[in-house]
Amino acid sequence: MARILKASAAEWVPASHDLSRLRAAAPACRGCELYQHATQVVFGEGPPDAKVVMVGEQPGDEEDRRGHPFIGPSGKLLSKAMQEAGLDREKIYVTNAVKHFKFLERGKRRIHAKPSGIEISACKPWLEAELAAIEPELVVCLGATAAQSLMGSAFRITASRGKFFPHPWAKELTATVHPSAILRAPERYEEEYELFLRDLRVIAGRVKELEKAS
Ligand code: URA
Ligand code: SF4
């Protein structure tokens, strides 16, 4: 019987810096068990020469059904905040740390389930390949899962949001909250949204500086 010894996407990731080749290979990935229940793989999208890459957690219900990243409720909130902060979503590559939707079935509803550390590290070769292809100035982690993938599990968003760190796969890395965290706390929406916007405005400023310096 075939057994997965170490969950990893590595053997399915082509040795290529061509994003369209990477995207074409992703549906065949069996690097962890998450492909089994999801509708489809949801790969990153955006320009191959993007200066900024934003990394979320994993596709949500709507992303899973339609096959594109950040198009559901959190994606809409992200787009609104980006626009307000002066970041053009069209110029940014948007992807996820884990490329299949993980969920629990509750009757007809599918409830988001947090990816495990094993799944996050299994899927990391795809993220690494995307970043190697794009070579961005800045990678932005949206929430703890992306930060765990790129900075390790000791990284804390609350302590480090809005700060910039060197990273081997981009000139710099920064982190902020995941937009779904703002949607999950309606009683603190205004406050949390303003803090998110503040981080995105700092990011917009830093992108200008990095572009000037390069
Ligand atoms: N949440 C994510 O982290 N990514 C998506 O693509 C959608 C929701
Ligand atoms: Fe492969 Fe990532 Fe999907 Fe797991 S979640 S099967 S590693 S693409």
Image (cartoon, rainbow, N blue to C red):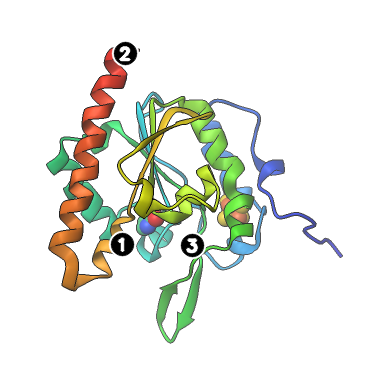
**Can residue 97 be spotted in the picture?**
no
Residue 199: x and y, percent? Answer: 24, 43
Please say if the residues under marks 2 and 3 sit with CB atoms less than 8 Å apart: no
Label 3 residue SS: loop
Image quarter in which the C terminus is found: top left
- How far is the residue under mark 2 from the one under mark 3? 38 Å
In the image as oriented, which residue stretches furthest toward the front? 159
Crowding at dot 2, Cα within 10 Å, few <14 / some 14-19 / many 20+, comes out as few
Q: Which residue is mark 3?
A: 101
Q: Is residue 142 left or right of residue 194?
A: right
Please give the name of the residue rendered at 56% of the width and 34% of the height, measured from the top-left corner.
129
Residue 36 to residue 136: above or below = below
Q: Earlier in the sequence, mark 2 or mark 3?
A: 3
Indicate if the residue with disc 1 has its beta carbon within 8 Å of ligand 1.
Answer: yes
- Residue at left 60%, top 27%? 16
Residue 162 lies, with reference to residue 48, above or below; the image says below
State the residue position of label 1: 180
Comparing 195 with 114, the one in front is 195
The residue mark sitting in front, 2 or 3, is: 2
Q: CA distance from mark 1 to mark 3?
A: 15 Å
Disc 2 versus disc 1: nearer the observer: 2
